Image (cartoon, grey):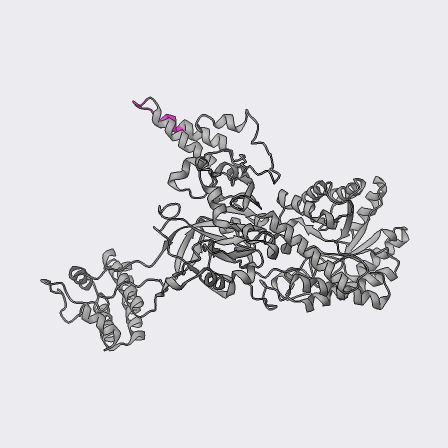
Amino acid sequence: MPALACCVDAAVAPPGHAFAGDSSLPAPPFSGVPPATTAVPTDSSHWSPSLSSDLYRIDAWGGPYFTVNSSGNVAVRPHGSATLPHQEIDLLKIVKKVSDPKPDCGLGLQLPLIVRLPDVLKNRLESLQGAFDLAIQSHDYASHYQGVYPVKCNQDRFVVEDIVRFGSPFRFGLEAGSKPELLLAMSCLCKGNPEALLICNGFKDFEYISLALFARKLALNTVIVLEQEEELDVVIDLSKKLGVLPVIGARAKLKTKHSGHFGSTSGEKGKFGLTTTQILRVVKKLDQLGLLDCFQLLHFHIGSQIPSTALLADGVSEAAQIYCELVRLGANMKFIDIGGGLGIDYDGSKSSDSDISVSYSLEEYAAAVVRAVRNVCDRKSVKHPVICSESGRALVSHQSVMIFEAISSSACDDVPPMSAFALQYFIEGLTEEARADYRNLSAAAIRGEYEACLTYADQLKQRCIDQFKEGSLGIEQLATVDGLCDMVSKAIGASDPVRTYHVNLSVFTSIPDFWGIGQTFPIVPIHRLDQRPAVRGILSDLTCDSDGKIDKFIGGESSLPLHELEGNGGANGGGQKYYLGMFLGGAYQEALGGVHNLFGGPSVVRVSQSDGPHSFAVTRAVPGPSCSDVLRVMQHEPELMFETLKHRAEEYGQGDDGGMASAAVATSLARSFHNMPYLVATSSCCLTAMNNHGLYYCSEDDYDVVADSAGGGGGEEDQWSYCCA
């Protein structure tokens, strides 16, 4: 007997009831089918953390910095492969420390949360330097590697300062592409190695070039890289006026380019740089002015996320040829700057055919660069130049983890068995054509013709929709046909099993590259990985925008394996919280994020490895921007807004309570201005009523604690004290 026919047998009227209306119409053929779920019917007892690691490819994209520990939580290995077992940091413990109330020894901060890991950043920098040092030694290269960090990748003060501090033994410098970036680079490099390079890229005006020349006056090792030929005249004119001898570089437009998304600014038609004809004119002009010795650096960039070392070597070889020709023409060449392009394997596939993966290691990348430069220079009998790279994405991507909550999930509505009364009411409103569809649906179910069932169900639903639009069918009957069609889909396995998980996050603010260019990042539950994920889901954010969702994941998946929410809730459901982490997002996401729907940035904590009981210390913590902060970004004045609302509360709150009600309203309003825009659990709302400039620190003797003040008196704090007590 066909499976669906069993459903027909099960669909009988309750005792003492008869189906009214047209007696030729059978009972609903699927009314006895239990609602389908999205759960995977498998035994969870045999699941393990290692299986979760394989499922989410954590070792592939996260190695050597992220792993799954025996508790089923994602752990950080702060020193990479050199991390000892007792040094691993459990991300769930960080979340607990950060989000627990202060009376419970927590920091009382709200999610979403960025966890910064300076130990990982240090290890990435040392690994990059070590890869080039090994390649230089292995290929008998007669100069050294000297990297710079492009601050556009992440301009956060502590990220940039860490790079300067960690890179000082290696003469590691900074690259700037705008006037404010140049100012911060100049300031930070005052504490760096005197030989560290300050590379000035980007389009330049009079003031930009003046700043760069002032940097040379301040004994910073500054190189002005010409992006446009006309910049040279300004450099020459200002250097004479300021009495500063400039060091000049030129960005070359190579013929080499890669075809992926990140290669669109490279090649002959790229946005930046000089053609060979323009470079020759620069050489001629400098020679005529007796300034050819100032020309010391050649820069190029064939695109971010270079997928293979073959393409890399091709571009480096072309640039090395230009470098050698400049030496032949009399330029005082010292540096070849290979730009950015060192890629990140976001999905762990080790593929050269993807925008989100690369097919090489750090060591293979460095070897390809050194070998290509050496081969060209040796053929031309040119002294080996200092090799410089601007590897930003590869340095800072791993040092940042975004953690956020799933607050609820939506599943298909459970459709209860149809009662005799509901059937009668439904049938009475149908047209003859709709009744025919109903008969055909029942007959197809008995015969086991699944495709026909779907066809007749769709026809029935469309006829009922048409009737509803005409006003001849009630909303109850429309809901009934919706339920009937859902029942059909579930019974034959044609319903969409993917759930929507609502997350306390703004995609536009925190993962703008996903929305803007379709960039995918590893997203993984950071706990419960000792349990089998029983459902698949997509992630929907808080914004009032249909694009505010994540429905593309690494591996080309359109949904993500997830666990059932316990009590269906974090912020609103009242159940156990379910935390997800987005990894490898330390580059660009914070700088590109906007304030769509006035959702501001997340809270930020800085976590270092410690020998304490939890293996970590929170050395800096900052609450995310408050509602007041994001309102100010759009030119609103929160203090005046509050005064307006408080006045309205007093005006409409007069009564026998002596104004207590209006005072309570004003207190609640003030708290809302000072809270973050994201959802807050009811039990902890009061914990977020804090001055947004407050900073909280763990007491750790082994780590420097940043002692920023929480703001002066007599300002905003006093103004709002009326209702923030």
Placement of the N terminus among the 4 image quadrants: bottom left
Q: Quadrant of residue 672?
A: top left
Is 680 above or below relative to 489?
Answer: above
Is 722 above or below relative to 28?
Answer: above
The x and y percentages for residue 565 are 37, 53
User: In the picture provided, is 238 more to the left or to the right than 132?
Assistant: right
Q: Is residue 191 visible?
A: yes
The x and y percentages for residue 351 are 59, 68
For the image shown, how many numbered marks are present on the structure?
A: 0
Look at 79% across and 53% down and name the residue there: 249
Residue closest to the eye, 136 or 12: 136
Look at 39% across and 47% down and name the residue there: 570
Look at 45% across and 56% down and name the residue there: 72
User: In the picture provided, is 484 more to the left or to the right than 543?
Assistant: left
User: In the picture provided, is 598 more to the left or to the right than 407?
Assistant: right
Q: Is residue 256 visible?
A: no
Q: Quadrant of residue 184?
A: top right
User: In the picture provided, is 429 more to the left or to the right than 706?
Assistant: left
Residue closest to the eye, 258 or 114: 114
Q: Is residue 18 magenta?
A: no
The x and y percentages for residue 176 are 70, 48
Magenta stretch bounds: 648-657
Q: Quadrant of residue 540?
A: bottom left
Placement of the C terminus among the 4 image quadrants: top left
